């Protein structure tokens, strides 16, 4: 009798546990996003998204904070309290190549994983300036990457551009999903289809925090 009671309790608890574990899966978060066509780009400028701010008021702008987070072998400008990065080394997530960074040579960009123009056309046009500044400076939406690949990407979404390093694509689309979910942005049907095809190859992929 006791064994039967235990089995019944497990039967009731396991579905709930599975559901709890699934909350952070990329595919489940993707499926909760609204699907709509891209809105017009009318009115968009990068100035609508103030970026490289110092939102946490620690004396370092967002760009240098991302460089400090993503690069190794860092050298800082003297007198900046280890804030302004003047050189370092990046294992580029988009290509898998090691890139040397120097403040005097443009080899690395800070990419908005959900491009600002894309954000504008999928809901951010309705944000106030403070919220647009938030998405433009959110570490979740920022990665240090090879500058040439960032410019190749432009304002593309997953339906039009993916990192050439295929082993990074699952993490890449999961990060896009996380950003869109955090800011209640929508996805287009082709974008969702492209992301779903990527996630089919990495079952269990989680969204980053």
Image (tube, helix red, strand yellow):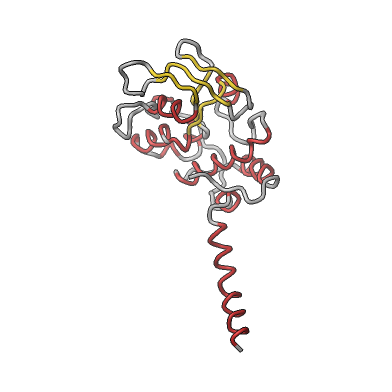
Relative image position of residue 186 (x, y in whole percent):
52, 44
Q: Can you say which quadrant of the picture contains the N terminus? A: bottom right
Q: Is residue 89 above or below residue 142?
A: above
Whether residue 33 is situated above or below residue 116 in the rendered picture: below
Which residue occupies the extreme front position in the image? 73
The mark tally for this picture is: 0
Please indicate, yes or no, whether residue 117 appears anywhere in the rendered image: no
Residue at the bottom extreme, as displayed: 1
Where does residue 156 sit, x and y in percent of width and height? Answer: 58, 30
Q: Residue at x 57, y 48 (%)?
A: 206
Residue 188 can be seen, yes or no:
yes
Position of 194 compared to 47: left or right? right
Q: Where is residue 163 in the image (x, y as percent from the top left)?
A: 63, 30
User: With 20 as the anchor, is 7 left or right in this view?
Assistant: right
Residue at the extreme top of the image, as rendered: 104
Residue 10 placement (x, y as % from top left): 59, 75
What residue is at 63 percent from the left and 35 percent from the top?
Answer: 168
Check the image and report above or below for 154 versus 56. above
Q: In this view, does 164 lie above or below 176?
A: above
Residue located 63% across and 40% down the image: 170
Q: Is 38 in front, or is 60?
A: 60
Quarter residue 152 falls in? top right
91, 21: nearer the viewer: 91
Q: Which residue is drawn at 63% across and 51% down?
A: 204
């Amino acid at each position: 009798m006791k064994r039967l009671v235990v089995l019944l309790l497990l039967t009731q608890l396991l579905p709930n546990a599975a559901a709890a574990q699934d909350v952070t899966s990329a595919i489940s978060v993707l499926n909760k996003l609204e699907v709509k066509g891209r809105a017009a780009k009318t009115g968009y400028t990068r100035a609508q998204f103030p970026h490289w701010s110092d939102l946490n008021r620690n004396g370092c702008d967002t760009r240098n904070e991302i460089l400090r987070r993503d690069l190794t072998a860092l050298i800082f400008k003297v007198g900046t309290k280890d804030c302004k990065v003047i050189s370092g080394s990046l294992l580029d997530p988009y290509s898998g190549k090691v890139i040397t960074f120097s403040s005097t040579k443009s080899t690395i960009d800070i990419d908005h994983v959900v491009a600002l123009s894309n954000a504008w056309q999928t809901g951010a046009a309705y944000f106030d300036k403070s919220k647009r500044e938030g998405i433009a400076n959110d570490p979740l939406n920022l990665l240090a990457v090879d500058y040439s690949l960032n410019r190749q990407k432009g304002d593309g979404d997953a339906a039009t551009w993916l990192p050439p390093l295929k082993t990074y694509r699952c993490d890449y689309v999961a990060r896009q999903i996380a950003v869109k979910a955090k800011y209640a942005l929508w996805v287009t049907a082709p974008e969702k289809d492209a992301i779903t095809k990527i996630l089919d190859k990495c079952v269990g992929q989680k969204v980053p925090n």
